[in-house]
Amino acid sequence: MLTRRILTILPVAVIVVLLQSAFWVPTYDRQDVGGDARLRTFITSSIGDAKFTNPVISTDAASLDIAALVYEGLLDIDENMEWEGALAERWSTSSVATLALLEGRPLADGSVATAEAVQRILREAAADTPGAESPEGALGAAISSIRTLPPETVSRVESITVADEEGKPTSRDLEIAISNPIRVQFELDRVVPDLEARLTSLLGESLLAPVGLRSRIETEATDEELDALGERRDELFQVLRQNPVMLFHLRRGVTFHDGHPFDAGDVVFSYQAYVDPLTASPRASTWEPVESVTALDDHTVRVVYKRLFSPATIAWAGPTILPEHLMNRAALEREMDRRGIEGEARERFGLRQSETARNPIGTGQYRFVEWQSDEYIHLRAYEGHWKKVPEYRDYYYRIIPERVTQEVELRSGGIDAYEAPAYQIPRYREDPRYRFISAPQGYYAYIGYNTQREPFEDMRVRKALGMAIDVDAIIEFVLYGEGDRVTGPYYITTPFYNPETPKLPYDPQGARELLDEAGWTPGPDGIRTKDGKRLAFTIATNNGNPQRKAIVTIAQNAWKDIGVEVTTQLLEWTVFIEQYTGLEFDAVVLAWGGGSLNPDLYQLWHSSQTGPGQMNRAGYANPEADALIEEIRRTYDPDQQRVLARRLHSVIAADHPITFLYSARANLILDQKIVRVDTDAEGNETLSRVEPASGGRIAYWFDHWRKVTNPPHLEAAN
């Protein structure tokens, strides 16, 4: 009897509980049930997990997404695409020039140059400000102080690579002593790119004529050793040297997420971390032009550059600054002691091996809470942030490899933002539950080739592969028209993109002729061969991206049609990135983005950046491109910089190191309940729809976003 009653009552009780739960369990439409915790939590997703969150060593998109929330730089770009202070309240740029007076050299009037005579001429130019329209007057107006430096011998130790007795390359140190004559040093309140021409007009051409390093070395060194110095050879002694200087005045009262004060020591340490060979940072080349970073006091940092380097400002923006007290050598020694790391492993131990690589602590608006690998990363708003505590208290970065699953999660309220494939856009435009935002973005999709492997070292092969792809059809049928053809490495949203660079034509017959010319001729089965080798390779991309998967299939079919045998691979993101960054690939479908206004392409396209862990993963090398990249770094005039960048764009495009495909628009779907919140001085809130900032930056105002139950724009619509 009792059993019968239990069996009768239990199902009824379960039904009652389930019915009751419908009134208190949060759903998509009622996410505020039981409190506002879900409304104060932003959940987004990524197809792949992060690898490292330390910005010094991060390269994948997921890692950089997290680093941008946790870490900060000295500078930032405001809503109008203008520079503004971040961890630095203010900054200035100046330069220090040093003119070596070599024995017996004359001035413009024929008299022998002396420090006193040169100083007099420069002081007269500095006093002659009414003539500032002339080169001499403009130079004089920039001079703020002048002094004479006595002769001195400077000893240096330079690392070089030379051949040993067996002809094998070996690294060793070269000790050299350089004799510096009397020098006149003068400070300028700005960088003067044409300083040599202006001084030549004042002092005469003979005084500034260059001289070889050999004549200034007091120690023995062979020509082979000097040649091994490379670019450094020309910098070790210069008759005229101009060193740009950036002076940063740091924001006071800033703390890291563990409460430790931020100061100038953290800036110095961060620079050292980027250039430390043990770190092997893929961004080390950005910091190579730096000669010194010095803390003048706790809140002032002076950065001196070896040479003209126009991207200097950009280098200090974004997630850059690390906590010295947690990552310096003493902290790493303590970590190794705790973890029992000894021997060779201890000697190789650096930021890549440290727990801090996956346990980030910065000064950013969000602090790290938890990381469940391949599941999610949890961040929380940092209450002690110097600028603004974000409206969202919690931030979850979920790993959802499949786009289909991402969409299901969006529609059930499991995530708040979703990058919709183009074919889904029409239905989201009409759905009142969602906010569809379309914006141009700094981005290009491409098919990349490992030019260090056969057959991709031949430009004709790369060009033929590109000509076989109908990019316009990809834009029409894969992107549903939501994209633009691109021709080269600069983003279409920047002034550096060259609209005059011709698009690679879709021409399968021309592609066949190019392969014939390159010696790849069709075999009995239609696959081309050369010297007994088949024209065959593998093209890979990451799983979970339907557009890239479609491009892989389109490329495979197009290349088969011209006699190329292609195997396809769809890999999990972490595996894919591991192979790609290690240069273990034939061809890949990928995209590069970020929307940067930086004209400096050194990391991505200079021939010195082709090694494992570096970012020129196509292995591209062209002396003309290298020279343009280096000249852009020396050019401070925006108009001239644009001219050089557009020329570089065309040079790289003509070499076809990758097949440039398209720039897709950013198509972001947000929960319609997400609004922008602005608070006035009295604490009154104004709610408005989420809109992109200039440059198409959808998430620029993210710290102002909040989810609310009844947004005003929805109430108005009703």
Image: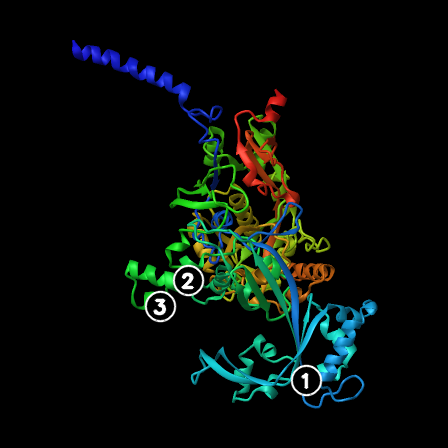
Mark 3, residue position: 347
Query: Is 439 on the left-hand or right-hand side of 136?
Result: left
In the foreground, 390 or 141: 141
Q: Amino acid at mark 1?
A: Leu
Q: What distance separates the C-alpha of mark 2 from that of mark 1?
A: 42 Å
* Quadrant showing the C terminus: top right
Q: Position of residue 519 (x, y in %)?
A: 58, 65
Residue drawn at point x = 33 percent, y = 15 percent: 15
Q: Residues within 10 Å of mark 3 (few under 14, many from 20)?
A: few
Residue at the location (52% across, 40% down)? 390
Q: Earlier in the sequence, mark 2 or mark 1?
A: 1
**Residue 179 at least partly seen:** no
Quarter of image, res 54: bottom left
Report the side of 40 relative to 125 (left or right).
left
Above or below, comparing residue 645 to residue 696 in the picture: below
Which residue carries the number 1 mark? Answer: 101
Helix or strand or loop: what does disc 3 sit on?
Answer: helix
Give coordinates of residue 530: x percent, y percent: 53, 64
Could you tell me the amino acid type at mark 2? Answer: Asn
Of labels 3 and 2, earlier in sequence is 2
At mark 2, the secondary structure is loop
Q: Nearer the viewer, mark 1 or mark 3?
A: 1
- Tell me which corner region of the image, top left, top right, bottom left or bottom right, holds residue 422: top right
Q: Earlier in the sequence, mark 1 or mark 3?
A: 1
- State the mark number for residue 328: 2
SS of the residue at dot 1?
Answer: loop
C-alpha separation, residue under disc 3 versus residue under disc 2 = 15 Å
